[in-house]
Image (cartoon, rainbow, N blue to C red):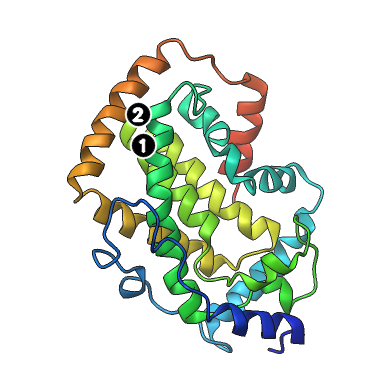
């Protein structure tokens, strides 16, 4: 596997950067949880797992310009993640309608950043489109190229939010976790992550969530968020029915 010279140089330079999240307001002390201790390394070149990643990348390129491609593009925007979960939740909520949830997500973001950054900069795995031909659903920016592939940050964040929402609205947990899976798979559809990196993101989020549940502050905030969610859902508008039917079908459909 040969990387474009610019991408290879950028990855090498980026590896010298400090880990994001180390100075953020977080639930966990930096030494309380290190994702590098909980994730295996990515597949080695030439292994069956690595060949599977390449096969999946090429098998999903025909999804370009389909409804699933459009959903993957929408899922790439982290700022709309609550709207992305609206159908699974059965209610349209916003940071304004659920300020306690928004504050908890913002604090948790620091923990997620650190959980993603550690393994990314340890393994420096390049994204698949840098050495395989095929369209991707996002602009091929330098910023995207220099951010390593493993684990997927979007998958880790999508699953982290999904797990949080599933605790806040346990009656909707199956739908919420199915949507979390869809958020991760959108990165494969997009062509910006290998499947194994998306799967690592799911594992990363679950490991982190388990650690977070050991935090007294996290548990106290979760109790407040659960009460807020129960109250808000009584009056929150329902998301568009046609949109939800289409989205649910897309997420439920196997990629391959």
At x 58%, y 70%, the residue is: 149
Q: Hey, which residue is sitting farthest front in the picture?
A: 23
- Residue 255 visible, this angle: no
- Identify the image quadrant of residue 84: top right
Q: Residues within 10 Å of mark 2 (few under 14, many from 20)?
A: some
- Residue 242 visible, this angle: yes
- Identify the image quadrant of residue 192: bottom right
Question: In what quadrant of the picture does the C terminus appear?
Answer: bottom right
At x 63%, y 20%, the residue is: 240
For label 1, the residue is 166
Q: Is residue 247 left or right of residue 225?
A: right
Mark 2 lies on a secondary structure that is: loop
Image spot of residue 139 (x, y percent)? 78, 59
- Identify the image quadrant of residue 252: top right
Is 255 located above or below residue 81 in the figure?
below
Image spot of residue 173 (x, y percent)? 37, 35
Q: Residues within 10 Å of mark 1 (few under 14, many from 20)?
A: many
Give the numbered dot on residue 191. none
- Answer whether labels 1 and 2 touch (C-beta < 8 Å): yes
Is 207 located above or below residue 96 in the figure?
below
Question: In what quadrant of the picture does the N terminus appear?
Answer: bottom right
Distance of label 1 from label 2 (alpha carbons): 5 Å
Image spot of residue 51 (x, y percent)? 61, 80
Q: Nearer the viewer, residue 100 or 89?
A: 100
Give the numbered dot on residue 169. 2
């Amino acid at each position: 596997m040969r990387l474009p010279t610019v991408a290879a140089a950028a990855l090498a330079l980026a590896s010298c950067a400090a880990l994001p999240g180390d100075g953020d307001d977080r639930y966990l002390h930096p030494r309380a949880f290190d994702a590098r201790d909980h994730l295996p390394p990515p597949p080695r070149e030439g292994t069956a797992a690595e060949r599977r990643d390449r096969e999946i990348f090429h098998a999903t390129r025909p999804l370009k310009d389909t409804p699933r491609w459009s959903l993957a593009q929408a899922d790439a925007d982290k700022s709309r993640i609550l709207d992305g979960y609206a159908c699974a939740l059965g209610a349209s909520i916003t940071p304004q309608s659920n300020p306690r949830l928004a504050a908890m997500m913002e604090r948790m973001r620091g923990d997620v950043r650190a959980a993603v950054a550690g393994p990314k900069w340890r393994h420096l795995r390049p994204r698949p489109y840098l050495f395989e031909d095929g369209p991707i659903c996002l602009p091929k920016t330098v910023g995207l190229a220099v951010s390593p592939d493993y684990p997927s940050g979007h998958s880790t964040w999508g699953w982290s939010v999904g797990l949080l929402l599933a605790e806040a609205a346990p009656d909707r947990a199956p739908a919420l976790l199915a949507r979390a899976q869809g958020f991760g798979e959108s990165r494969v559809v997009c062509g910006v992550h290998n499947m194994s990196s998306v799967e690592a993101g799911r594992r990363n989020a679950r490991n982190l969530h388990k650690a977070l549940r050991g935090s007294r502050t996290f548990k106290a905030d979760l109790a407040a968020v659960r009460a807020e969610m129960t109250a808000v859902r009584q009056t929150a508008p329902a998301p568009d029915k046609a949109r939800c039917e289409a989205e649910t079908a897309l997420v439920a459909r196997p990629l391959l």
